[in-house]
Image (cartoon, rainbow, N blue to C red):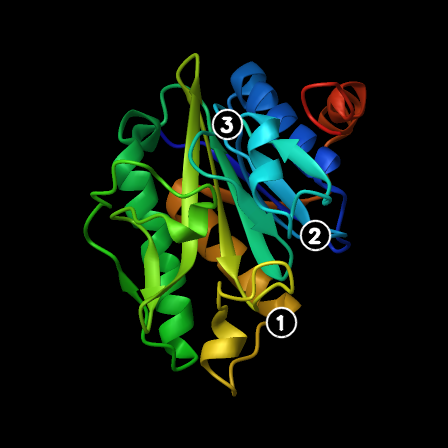
Amino acid sequence: MTAPVQLILDELPHPGVWNMAVDAALLEESLRNGTVFVRLYRWSEPTVSLGYFQKPVECESDPRISHLPSVRRLSGGGAILHDKEQTYSCVLPPGHTLAEQPSRLYDLIHSLVVGLLREQGVDVQPRGHDSKSAIEPFLCFLREASPDLVVLGHKVLGSAQRRRRGAVLQHGSLLLKASEFAPELLGLHDLFATFHWSTDDAKELGRRITRVLGDALEIVELPQSVRSAASAVEITPDLAH
């Protein structure tokens, strides 16, 4: 199945509750009208996103981040400290070829990031194996999964998915620079002094993702129907504290 693809490039960073509400609304919109969405966005303040099955009380185990705003993601996995990063999300409707092959979607998008970074001289590789740890760390970027992208032994890109009624939401975080709240998690700027990530790079990544997901690229503002739906669920007891 091919589908129209709408690329949404958020020019301004947003709070975590809005970012997660928009991703949830895009998933519902794709279910409703069969559109593929790709979104590139940032965060207006350091924010912890909890995996869907994590409990808010787990944030209290790390005093460095316990005071930060937190939100719940639709996807599972470990918590992510969103600070100095580039975030992407993509939504595929039911019936899309890649919606039936979730592992292939990871590999495909991660390969596009690999290509873009290598053009900038960054030797990045997929991890290629999963962690064998019986107890996973709280933070996602301390966990090890096969699709992770790794540079000089440091995880710089991790992604997660959520399936709903045949549709798929995938989002991922490209770590650009270490946060003061987790300085051990090095980003690309820390690992390569000459590395530079610009708005144009974000746009190019978005365009590359859209080209492999559908047959008609259209750069759009956030649809009003999605904006309205996101506003309705932006703040709930389950999303923020």
Q: Residue at 73%, 44% (x, y): give it.
A: 67
Q: Amino acid at mark 1?
A: Ser
> In front here: 165 or 14?
14
Q: How many marks?
A: 3
Nearest to the eye among marks 3 and 1: give it. 3
Residue 230 image offset from top left, x and y in percent: 74, 25
Kind of residue at badge 3: Gln
Q: Residues within 10 Å of mark 1 (few under 14, many from 20)?
A: few
Q: Quadrant of the C terminus?
A: top right
Residue under numbered circle 3: 54
**Foreground disc of the pair 2, 1:** 2
At x 50% / y 27%, what residue is drawn?
54
Name the side, left or right, on which 45 lies relative to 91: right
Residue of label 2:
46
Q: Residue 26 location in percent, x, y?
A: 61, 28
Question: Which mark's residue is nearer the viewer, 3 or 2?
Answer: 3
Confirm whether residue 214 shows in the render.
no
Mark 3 vs mark 2, CA separation in Å? 19 Å
Q: Nearer the viewer, residue 154 or 10?
A: 154
Task: Tell me if 233 is positioned left or right of 96 in this view.
Answer: right
Q: Residues within 10 Å of mark 2 (few under 14, many from 20)?
A: some
Instruction: Report the side of 160 relative to 59 (left or right).
Output: left
Rendered view: 43 above or below 200: above
Residue 179 visible:
yes
Could you tell me residue 217's position as x and y percent?
53, 46
Mark 3 nearby-residue class (10 Å; few <14, some 14–19, many ≥20): some
